[in-house]
Amino acid sequence: MVSLYRGLLLVLMALLPSAHGAAAMARSKISAAFMFGDSIVDPGNNNDRLTEAKANFPPYGQDFPGGVATGRFSNGKVPGDMLVSRLGIKELLPPYLGNDLPLSELLTGVVFASGGSGYDPLTSIPSAATSSTGQLELFLEYKERLRALVGEEEMTRVISEGIYFTVMGANDLANNYFTIPLRRHQYDLPSYVKFLVSSAVNFTMKLNEMGAKKIALIGIAPIGCCPSQRELGSRECEPMRNQAANLFNSEIEKEIQRLDAEQNVQGSKFIYLDIYYNLLDLIQRSDFYGFKEVNEGCCGSTMLNVAIFIKNHPACPNAYDFIFWDSFHPTEKAYNIVVDKLFQQKMQYLM
């Protein structure tokens, strides 16, 4: 019996270093994370903006630590928080704006994302969001601020060793192309998607030129499955919006692979991360993942069941059963599953 216990102990000792070693490797190589994008990852940058696209009030944040509505567009944590936690950097990825962040937070990464933003410069105008270009300007400001605090050498190290995520495009389609007539008069859908892809590539290259060497571009989710985008009363996802998202994803994935092949010799890495099929899998196999409601949002399902329009509405009592929190954004539980899938698939390439 003693020899059996000793044998089990030796097996456990052999296994434990490999698990901890992987986390230690991630921590040693990636000391900071930076996020650009829209409301999927905005943790509160819009709180002080004059915009409808904010979430710093109940029922948002009901399942966040302390039940605080921080400005995250969900019932709890959002993907940026989950990504830095899994990377072993810190537990929450804070907004760059609106907080007097301590140096420890600045050194380990922040979020520049703004709810309502997109790759198309016109997308951010109706929502008064910080545009994609504006987010790059904030990143430049951040670099100067960090340089003043820790010096050129340390600032350069933080920037070059950090990991960068971009999550945009959903608003370009759902709240711009399919909602406002202007772009539809200028472009047919394939041409508009081509314009978005070009804009996303330009954004990625500018970020790289500003010092980012490990960049992950996350594609567009199946927006036609969001409660607000489905046809009224339908249990089916809206096909045109999903086709548009899928087209963008397939084209941007090729471009990211091309960039990676071209820039890899210079020490930069680019990857495309799929959110489309990972979230669609939850929707199509909801029972497997423990969800009871796929078509409705926990806080409602119309265009007016999101952001400032549900300010101080009664909290949804059973968010755990829902894939969608409001009519556009997933729940913390859904985000957690999707982020786990992203880590299992391609994230190791950036480590």
Image: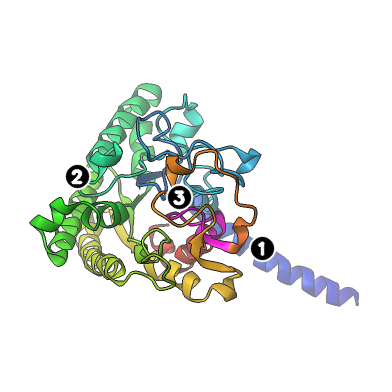
Look at label 3 and name its amino acid.
Asn
Q: Earlier in the sequence, mark 3 or mark 2?
A: 2
Q: Residue 199 at x, y = what percent?
A: 18, 52
Looking at the image, is mark 1 or mark 2 earlier in the sequence?
1
| Residue closest to the eye, 95 or 74 | 74
Looking at the figure, which quarter contains the C terminus?
Answer: bottom left
Q: Residues within 10 Å of mark 1 (few under 14, many from 20)?
A: few
Residue type of the residue flagged with mark 2: Leu
Within-10-Å neighbours for mark 2: few <14, some 14–19, many 20+: some
Q: Is residue 145 left or right of residue 291?
A: left
Query: Contact (CB < 8 A) between labels 1 and 2?
Result: no
Q: Nearer the viewer, residue 161 or 223?
A: 223
Please tell me which of labels 3 and 1 falls first in the chain: 1
Please give the count of numbered marks on the rendered protein: 3
Query: Which image quadrant for residue 219?
Result: bottom left
Q: Which circle marks residue 122 in the picture?
A: 2
Gap between marks 3 and 1 measured at Cα: 46 Å
Q: Please indicate whether residue 149 sits to the left or right of residue 60 in the image.
A: left
Which residue is rendered at x = 60% and y = 51% of the image?
316
Name the residue beneath numbered marker 3.
305
Range drawn in magenta:
322-336
Alpha carbon of mark 3 to alpha carbon of mark 2: how far? 23 Å
Residue 253 place in picture, x, y as percent: 26, 66
Q: Is residue 327 magenta?
A: yes
Q: Which mark is residue 16?
A: 1
Callout 3–callout 2 Cβ contact below 8 Å: no
Left or right relative to 186: residue 37: right
